[in-house]
Image: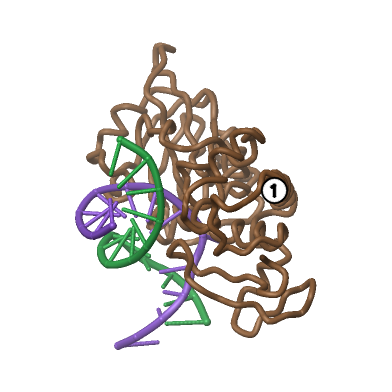
Chain colours: A brown, B purple, C green
Amino acid sequence: MPELPEVECARQVVDRALHRTIVGVDDTDEFVCRPHAPGDLQRALKGGQLVAAHRRGKSIWCDMVDAGGDPGPALGIHLGMGGRIVVTGPAGTASGGDPVPVSGKAIWNRFVLRFDDGGELRLFDKRRLGRVRLDPAIDALGPDAAEISRADFRTRVGRGTAPLKARLLDQATLAGVGNLLADETLWRARLAPTRRAGSLSVEELDELRRVLRAAIRRAILRGGVHTGDLIEHRRPGGHCPRCGAELVRATIGSRTTWWCPAEQQ
DNA sequence: ACCTATGTTGATAC
DNA sequence: GGTATCAACATAGG
């Protein structure tokens, strides 16, 4: 599920793991922890504490201190296509806070921090496309989609010959927009995903930014991008919930894309 | 068996 | 160098 709204919720879950001493690390999943070797993360994290959880786009990273209280490497967490963060409280207490109960095989816990109070932070990810690494390259990401200024949005999004949807999905342009949020936002803005990004007027770009920010806020409040008004209609035979026209489907930016051919221009 | 999937990335070709 | 495209990644579920 993870696009920006889901990742912000996950970051808030990570907040509950702060200031707890790490006594155990399961970093044995070589795909999720790549390019680190098993044991690398354990050595870097054991005995330390997470002290802050940040997010930019779909990436989370945590500031660390070591056992002596000195700054350590940052711990980067990416949820991939379907990862979730679970943080449990001290042993014997209810597992805290996760809005949707997560249950499944232990093998789907791809990375685990165990704290001295008996609680854990887990990256639960059936699909295994999530990722954990030290000192992730956050600078490679564009500005966060929920924070980007109007001026930056105009110059970064409103250029180039790629289809508008591909531009929105480019995390180096703008961080946080995924496939569902892109379709929902373009539908709300009445813009065709096939438009060349550089062909948008300043007015269209400002409106697109306004609609995107509203869609993000709404998704955070309602529990995820899948709650968007268009999303349930993204299926064969689906119709535009505003005008009733049959939606069309195509692959744009190498992702499945649905839109209303009558309204989105 | 075959297809699709809310993401990222490295290779490739302009 | 910048830009754009897409297969590959690992796995589950329809």
Quarter of the image with the C terminus of chain A is bottom right
Q: Chain of mark 1?
A: A
The residue that mark 1 highlights is A220
Taking the spot 41% from the left edge, 22% from the top edge, the residue there is: A48
Lateral position of residue A210 relative to residue A136, left or right: right
Instruction: Please tell me in which quadrant of the rendered image residue A23 appears.
Output: top left
The secondary structure type at the circle numbered 1 is helix
Residue A184 screen position, x and y as percent: 66, 61
Lateral position of residue A199 relative to residue A81, left or right: right
Q: Nearer the viewer, residue A58 or A116?
A: A58
Residue A178 screen position, x and y as percent: 54, 54
Taking the spot 52% from the left edge, 44% from the top edge, the residue there is: A58
Residue A40 screen position, x and y as percent: 26, 33
Instruction: Please tell me in which quadrant of the rendered image residue B1 appears.
Output: bottom left
Which amino acid, mark 1? Ile
Q: Nearer the viewer, residue A52 or A4?
A: A4
A76 is higher (above) or lower (below) than A226 = above
Q: Count every numbered label the image shows and give the total.
A: 1
Lateral position of residue A186 relative to residue A197, left or right: right
Quarter of the image with the N terminus of chain A is bottom right
Residue C1 screen position, x and y as percent: 30, 35
Lateral position of residue B12 relative to residue A47, left or right: left
Q: Nearer the viewer, residue A53 or A21?
A: A53
Dot 1 crowding, Cα within 10 Å, few <14, some 14–19, many 20+: some
Taking the spot 72% from the left edge, 75% from the top edge, the residue there is: A240
